[in-house]
Amino acid sequence: MDGNGRWALARGLPRLAGHRAGTENLRRIITASVEFGVKYLTIYAFSTENWGRPREEVDGLMHILENVIDKELAELNKEGVQLRHIGHLERLAPALQKKVQYAIELTKNNSRLVLNVAFNYGGRDEIICAIQRIVRDGIRPEAVTDKLVGDYLFTAGVPDPDLIIRTSGELRVSNFLIWQGAYSEWYVTPIYWPDFNKDEYRKALDTYARRDRRYGGLSQSVEDDSHHAD
Ligand code: FPP
């Protein structure tokens, strides 16, 4: 959800106003996801590096998360959204941890859309945690496979992302789903997150639908041609 700060700056507003506008947009994007038939949506809300931001901004973001749960949970539940969290909850205030856990528990049987919230999340941190748990579980080195590592990540049970959308034009991964995103398609737009509306979202999905995913192999059309030649 990149670009909230710059969106606010461009309007002479405090950064938190940008995060609030970004949160309102997230609500619209969740509704659009349900409408478009997207089954899994992962949002990068707070990275392990974001603790380095000014105290006021960090506190403000925690407050926004709390507010969103208070105000939107019942409606999200009604819409069939299943809430999940990736990252570490321990560093959050105990009351907020409880709210997040309650939201996860309440919505765990919903299946229209899985909304994965990355909060206090970092891809390297996730891989380190997975390795630590694999070692602790005494797994034999030969048993460490792609599938096994996946099962030890925060995203266990969630398919790898088909498409990663980065708003505000930055051309970097920023520690987001670095294992899971190995073969994801990327879509980068200069639009700031609060302005990334339903039409822009549809544009991203349309672009994705025209991509030729090869996973390191050959495209289907090249393979079909080579069969003709046989
Ligand atoms: C990136 O923009 C945005 C963030 C670091 C925070 C996003 C979090 C929320 C909107 C709220 C909390 C969470 C939920 C689940 C509602 P930026 O600040 O890096 O923008 P900039 O690069 O323009 O400064």
Image (tube, rainbow, N blue to C red):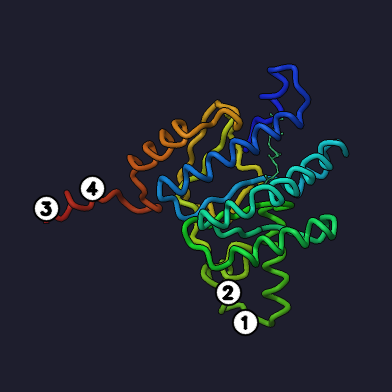
Please name whichever residue, 41 or 109, is drawn nearer the observer in this view of the structure. 109
- Label ID, residue 222: 4
Where residue 229 sits: x, y (%)? 11, 52
Callout 4 secondary element: helix
Residue 191 left/right relative to 58: left
Image-quadrant location for residue 210: top left
Q: Going from the N terminus, do you reach mark 3 or mark 1 first?
A: 1
Q: Going from the N terminus, do you reach mark 4 or mark 3 first?
A: 4
CA gap between label 4 and label 3 equals: 10 Å
CA gap between label 2 and label 4 equals: 34 Å
Contact? badges 4 and 1 (CB < 8 Å): no
Contact? badges 4 and 3 (CB < 8 Å): no
Callout 1 secondary element: loop
CA gap between label 1 and label 2 equals: 7 Å
Q: Quadrant of the N terminus?
A: top right
Q: Name the residue under label 1.
A: 140
